[in-house]
Image: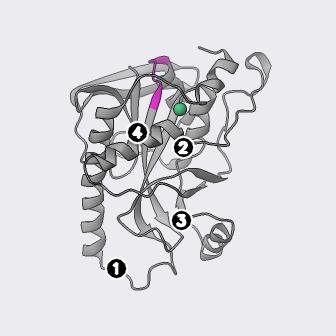
Amino acid sequence: MDFALIGGTGMDHLSLDRKKDITVDTPYGAVSLQTGEISGVEMVFLRRHGSGHTVPPHRINYRGNIWALKKLGVRKILATGAVGSIYPDYRIGDIVLVDQFLDFTKNRPQTFFDGGERGVLHVDVSEPYCPDLRKTILFGAQSIGVEVKTAGVYVCTEGPRFETPAEIKMYSILGGHLVGMTGVPEVVLARELGICYAAVALVTNEAAGISKQPLTHAEVTATMNMLGITAAKLINSTCRHLTKEQYCYCLTGGTEAGLF
Ligand SMILES: [Zn+2]
């Protein structure tokens, strides 16, 4: 299994063929996954919030999830997640290939390397999201005429509560564009194990003060539904362009660690 999709909120429109449930044992507990095909390409599918959306962002087993994918041989991870916009250029319905993050999480294990036998690793995240995989997604988008924004600073909060207006103002002043609760440490852990990782952020809401006029509930539901359908098309198209080779810097983390 070379490729994986980690699906967040709003991925109900994606269909996985030849679906099979599997469980992978990791040092962090057993992880439930599905294998199958998307656009004829073998994929591992991981529902970040569990089946039935029962796991909140701060309780997700990020280390177990990434370890399980590595154990299955995964080299590239496509991740999706719903985000709120805190910057006027990003509107509801936008799809963004984020390129940087600001980490405001508080209580999550951030690394596989806690010292001891496994040692210490200061992984490089100057380009946290794989530049090659981001290009593949962009190509996947262009080939079906889907518009995506190619940069954005993702702010990861601990949750599960939403942000205060004061926090939103602070994130905005610090250079954040989008806010979510699940992107970190997922992206960092993938880098530590030498897996390419790119995130597709789906803008499903706007923070207070960003939207000029409030949307009706019907408008929000319709937009979310359309965004889900478009995101599924984008993933389908991207899968057709995935290649096994890793020519990027991402591989270095795993090689240095020598864990697998
Ligand atoms: Zn890479």
Question: In the image, what residue type sits under mark 4?
Answer: Thr
Q: Is the residue 83 above or below the residue 57 in the image? A: below
Percent position (x, y) of residue 216? 30, 79
Can you identify the residue that label 4 sits on? Answer: 136
**Where are the magenta residues, as a range?**
71-76
Marks 1/3: CA distance?
19 Å
* Mark 1 or 4, closer to the camera: 4
Spatial CA distance of label 3 from label 2 is: 16 Å
Residue at (54% x, 47% y) in the render: 183
- Mark 1 Cα shell of 10 Å, populated few (<14), some (14-19), many (≥20): few
Assign the C terminus to one quadrant of the image: top right
Mark 1 or mark 3: whose residue is earlier in sequence: 3
User: Pointers 1 and 3 in contact (CB under 8 A)?
Assistant: no
Is 185 displayed left or right of 232 in the figure? right
Residue located 60% across and 71% down the image: 168
Q: Is residue 158 visible?
A: yes
Q: Nearer the viewer, mark 2 or mark 4?
A: 4
Which quadrant holds residue 28?
Answer: top right
Look at the picture and state if 102 lies above or below 114: below
Q: Secondary structure at mark 2?
A: helix
Nearer to us of marks 2 and 1 is 1
Relative to 150, is 250 above or below?
above
Q: Amino acid at mark 2?
A: Arg
Q: Position of residue 100 (x, y in %)?
A: 60, 51
Dots 2, 4 in contact, CB < 8 A: no
Toward the bottom, the furthest residue is 213
Q: Which residue is mark 3?
A: 162
Q: Position of residue 57 (x, y in %)?
A: 51, 48
- Quarter of the rendering containing residue 223: bottom left
Alpha carbon separation for disc pair 2 and 4: 31 Å
Quickly name the residue at label 2. 59
Q: Which mark is residue 215?
A: 1
